[in-house]
Amino acid sequence: MAKVKDNVHVHDNIYLLSVEYNGICKMGQFFMLRCWELDPLLSRPISIFDYEDGELKFLYQVVGKGTEKLSRLVKGDEITLHGPYGNGFPYLEKCEITLAGGGIGIAPLFYAGRELNRINPNRKLNIFLGFREKSPLIDVFKEQFQNVIVDIGGVITDEIIYKKESVIYTCGPEVMMQKICEEGMNSGATVYASVEKRMACGVGACLGCTCKTVNGNKRTCKDGPVFLGDEIIYG
Amino acid sequence: MDRLKVKFIDRTFKNPVVVASGTYGYGKDYLDYYDPSLLGGICSKGITLHQKSGNKGIRICETPSGLLNSIGLENPGVSKFIDAYLKEMSAIDTVKIINVGGNTIDEYIKAMELLNDCELGLIELNISCPNVKEGGMAFGIKADSAAEVTSKVKKVSRHKIMVKLSPNAENIIDIAKACEDSGADALSLVNTFQAMAIDIVKKESVFENMYAGLSGPAIKPIALRMVNQVYKNVSIPIMGMGGITTWQDAVEFIMAGSSCIQIGTANFIDPMTPIKVIEGLKDYCLGNNIENISDLVGVI
Ligand SMILES: Cc1cc2nc3c(=O)[nH]c(=O)nc-3n(C[C@H](O)[C@H](O)[C@H](O)COP(=O)(O)OP(=O)(O)OC[C@H]3O[C@@H](n4cnc5c(N)ncnc54)[C@H](O)[C@@H]3O)c2cc1C
Ligand SMILES: Cc1cc2nc3c(=O)[nH]c(=O)nc-3n(C[C@H](O)[C@H](O)[C@H](O)COP(=O)(O)O)c2cc1C
Ligand code: FES
């Protein structure tokens, strides 16, 4: 159980939930959240948006019953968190890294960017964000990071520069990630993609979240959610 | 006094709480939560003779109080299971139950032969998986085919055989009796109910395999009734399951005739469920002066 510190409506159907938490988490990991008894039955996987000083934040989009129930939480409420789960993005010393996100997939990239800057304050981050419409989240990123390139209503994948030495962390709609993974393979860039699948257990026990890879089936919750771009088999 | 210690066939379980096949991997996935040696037993994910990569498309979908799954018995095959996972499982101090599925009798027999060289607690013979195209559940629908596979497996296996029944059977009592008559050492029930969900936008089944298997609290009352009916008609021990999420549910299954109970879907709701159920059963026995939980089996 964790205590809710805040749950603010950001815009449209997007909310930012802050909870009290003191544990170790890595960028790109997620928690299974629930604030209900048995309806819906399963907990909901949500990525770490930010984590600092005993405060863990989740940025989520209301799309159904579970996220709708999350959106009704208010300060002081209790929420159940299981996790952190998953492998997360790798903590690379390498100086230049590109983060590419679309839609609610930008959520894990905020903490990834902050962590990458923390372990190497001199690094260069290139951040590409795709939105369907103008969003206050653009400013949230621009206040935190320097090179933020935003595309509204178009295709962000075309703006990314793919070079052999590029390292790209991506999360977003499947079509976007597939494109980045393909471009990565063509150019020799290294892509780490955070895959989204329906999950039941979150710990690797049920095989409900299988991702097809060139190395056989992998469990998105446990072996992922972050996979190498050239490993994932799409479609 | 060890109020929860139970005998099941000739095995001693430290408590009657077992985790169900397909919801607990090969025993190591919940290590961050508790030591699996605290459990009465662990059922492995269903193993087949040959490797299976499982079903394509969506594999899980929720319904009110229930979970539909269409995993399709994804597993590494018996030989790889023995090399890569059974040793790991063996290190856990609990009864290891290996769940074995198959498409043909020959596959079951070959799998049993390979497992004869291994140390394990029990075999759970899965004749009831609704998520594979042919075989699987087919053996669990008709009493004569269930009897045939049970007797043939009994002939080759040196291990005790617990046959896992399908709630989709034509007649659950007939099939239970047929398995007992064919030499089954125990029965477990129920596997998932064949069920369906439709994507009304795409106008197609949510699942590529069309139908899926329903588990969770939604099935509990029916599963309980089936356990009780089977209990009244066989004399071999029963492991009951289907929607157990609390210790009270477990007591109901025990009273209906289960010597041990299995917890499946509830592991996903709260990973600590099995431990909470064990604690609840312990307190229940203490508070009600029950010397051993077995005293409650089939009191209904
Ligand atoms: C590792 C991981 C991290 C995630 N991080 C975030 C995050 O930071 N912020 C956020 O808003 N969302 C995130 N998601 C997605 C989020 O888990 C789903 O949107 C949520 O579970 C939907 O629950 P619901 O009850 O509101 O909707 P439901 O009623 O369950 O579903 C609404 C719609 O979403 C689809 N859906 C449900 N679950 C998933 C899923 N896991 N993947 C794809 N489609 C699904 C359903 O088919 C349906 O069309 C993440 C998912 C994963 C796997
Ligand atoms: C995701 C999932 C996978 C399963 N895989 C298997 C399996 O491999 N073999 C088997 O005999 N039963 C399998 N089952 C069925 C369970 O072991 C159990 O019989 C059923 O879910 C009913 O119990 P429950 O309501 O407590 O989950 C599976 C169930 C689920 C939910
Ligand atoms: S959600 Fe169960 S294995 Fe990934």
Image (cartoon, helix red, strand yellow):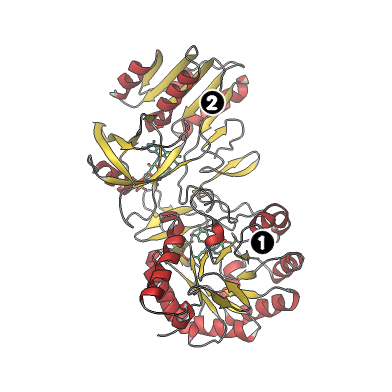
**Label 1 CB-ligand 2 distance < 8 A:** no
Q: Amino acid at mark 2?
A: Tyr
At 22% from the left and 39% from the top, the residue drawn is A75
At 41% from the left and 75% from the top, the residue drawn is B285
Rendered location of residue A198, percent (x, y): 45, 46
| Chain at numbered mark 2 | A
Q: Is residue B265 visible?
A: no
**The one of A173 and B233 positioned closer to us in this rendering:** B233
Rendered location of residue B126, percent (x, y): 60, 69
At 55% from the left and 82% from the top, the residue drawn is B176
Rendered location of residue B167, percent (x, y): 48, 73
Quadrant in the rendering for residue B68:
bottom left
Query: Left of B104 or right of it: where is B218?
Result: left
Q: From what the image shows, is residue B225 above or below residue A98?
A: below
The residue mark sitting in front, 2 or 1, is 2
Labels 2, 1: one chain: no
What residue does disc 2 label?
A: A91
The image's mark for residue B48 is 1
Q: From what the image shows, is residue B149 above or below residue B92?
A: below
Q: Quadrant of ligand 1?
A: top left
Dot 1: what SS? Answer: loop
Q: CA distance from mark 2 to mark 1?
A: 39 Å
Q: Is residue B99 visible?
A: yes
**The one of B141 and B162 positioned closer to us in this rendering:** B162
Dot 2: what SS? Answer: loop
Quadrant in the rendering for residue B134:
bottom right
**The one of A124 and B130 positioned closer to us in this rendering:** A124
